[in-house]
Amino acid sequence: MTKSELNKFKNILEAKQAELEQLVRNRDGIAIEKSPDALDEVQHASERELAIRNLDRESNLLRNVRAALRRIDEGSFGVCLHCEEDISPRRLAAVPWTAFCIQCQEMADRQMAAGAESLEELLVNAA
């Protein structure tokens, strides 16, 4: 991968990191609101649950973006962490924070659907 391509990905990842950091800081949606009306309580609880799920998803994505930036600094960006093959440029263009080639990611997704507990466990079992 050329230096200009790496810089392009680094800029994309840094912009995504800034965006996600802003979203993760906003925790207003998870505040517990009390209401005398039982239906309002249920509505607030479901809105809070949705906000928590979104915060969790955004936090995980932020973790992946930061890991991708570390891989750029370490010189291992664009290489699958499992099989150590190059990740296709099209995949990196679509998901620049990915750590796995499409084959390893599909294998992990299948095993995740089958009930494996963690990505590390998935990849160990896949090998």
Image (cartoon, rainbow, N blue to C red):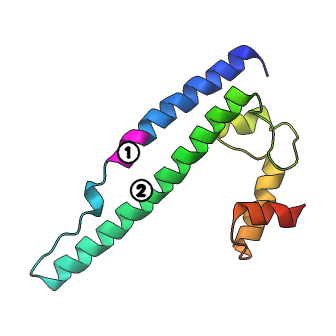
Height in image: 82 above or below 30? Answer: above
Count neighbours of disc 2 (C-alpha within 10 A) and say few if under 14, some if 14 to 19, many if 20 or more: many
- Considering every residue shown, the one lying at the far bottom of the view is 38
Q: Is residue 47 left or right of residue 90?
A: left
Please tell me which residue is depicted at 36% across the width and 69% down the height of the picture. 49
What are the residue bounds of the magenta stretch? 21-25
Q: Is the magenta stretch mostly helix, strand or loop?
A: helix
Residue 22 in magenta? yes
In the rendered image, the residue lying farthest to the front is 74
Q: In this rendering, does residue 96 appear at all?
A: no
Q: Where is residue 81 in the image (x, y as percent from the top left)?
A: 79, 46
Which is nearer the eye, 55 or 95? 55
Q: In this view, does 109 lie to the left or right of 11?
A: right
Amino acid beneath label 1: Leu
Q: Mark 1 points at which residue?
A: 23
Residue located 28% across and 74% down the image: 45
Question: In the rendering, which numbered label is found on residue 55?
Answer: 2
In which image quadrant can residue 111 be found?
bottom right
Report, in whole angstroms, how far the alpha carbon at label 2 lies from the one at label 1.
Answer: 8 Å
Give yes or no for contact between labels 2 and 1 (Cβ–Cβ under 8 Å). Answer: yes
Under circle 1, the secondary element is helix
Quadrant of image for the C terminus: bottom right
Residue situated furthest left in the rendering: 36
Residue 115, located in which quarter of the rendered image?
bottom right
Under circle 2, the secondary element is: helix
Assess whether residue 94 is covered by the magenta stretch: no
Query: Is 104 positioned to the left or the right of 49 in the image?
Result: right
